[in-house]
Image (spheres, helix red, strand yellow):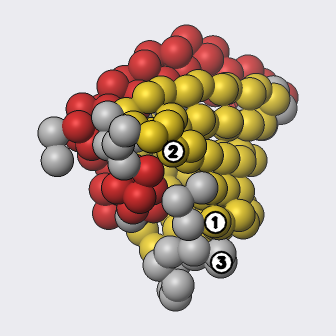
Amino acid sequence: MPGIVEHSVEIAAPVHEVFAYVDDFTNTKDWMYGLDRIEPVGEPLRGLGATYDGVMKLGVSLTSRIRCTGYEPDRLVEISSISGIKNTQRWTFTDLGDGRTRLDAWISYTLPGGPAGKVIEKAVNPVIAIAIKHTSERLVHNLEQR
């Protein structure tokens, strides 16, 4: 079952700091709701081609191997799955001036079909709104407290 989530948040931190924080996979568990594990797969660790194995726990465990498919410093990070749960995450960064940044998230995901997909959908869909709210709050808090 396909789904798309879009969300924006303003952060009282300069764009280069917000980008560096989001771009560093070692920080991701500190702000991304439900992320249980993220591990790099080879080199590079950042930028185009960086690949990671991840496990999200959103009522059920969802496993994916993801790769950075779009990258513009201080402007864009795009990550797409290459195996596991099909998903694409696009994070865009806008300098609002006065040390403020708008971070826009666009996330597309497709859950498996059939009976197993229906079970996963029932577990995951109610958690999505909670995940977005928590993720946004953690990002803002973590960056503004730096």
Callout 2: helix, strand or loop? strand
Return the residue at label 3. Answer: 49
Tell me residue 41's x, y (percent).
51, 78
Q: Nearer the viewer, residue 23 or 103?
A: 103
Q: Check residue 95 in the rendering and tell me which mark sits there, or answer none.
A: 2
Indicate left or right for 131 with 77 as reference. left
Callout 1: helix, strand or loop? strand
Indicate left or right for 30 with 107 as reference. left
Tell me residue 11's x, y (percent).
37, 33
Q: Is residue 42 above or below residue 106?
A: below
Viewer-side label of 1, 3: 1
Callout 3: helix, strand or loop? loop
Residue under the point 67% across and 26% down:
5
Q: Check residue 72 in the rendering and tell me which mark sits there, or answer none.
A: 1
Separation (CA) of disc 2 from disc 3: 25 Å
Separation (CA) of disc 1 from disc 2: 14 Å
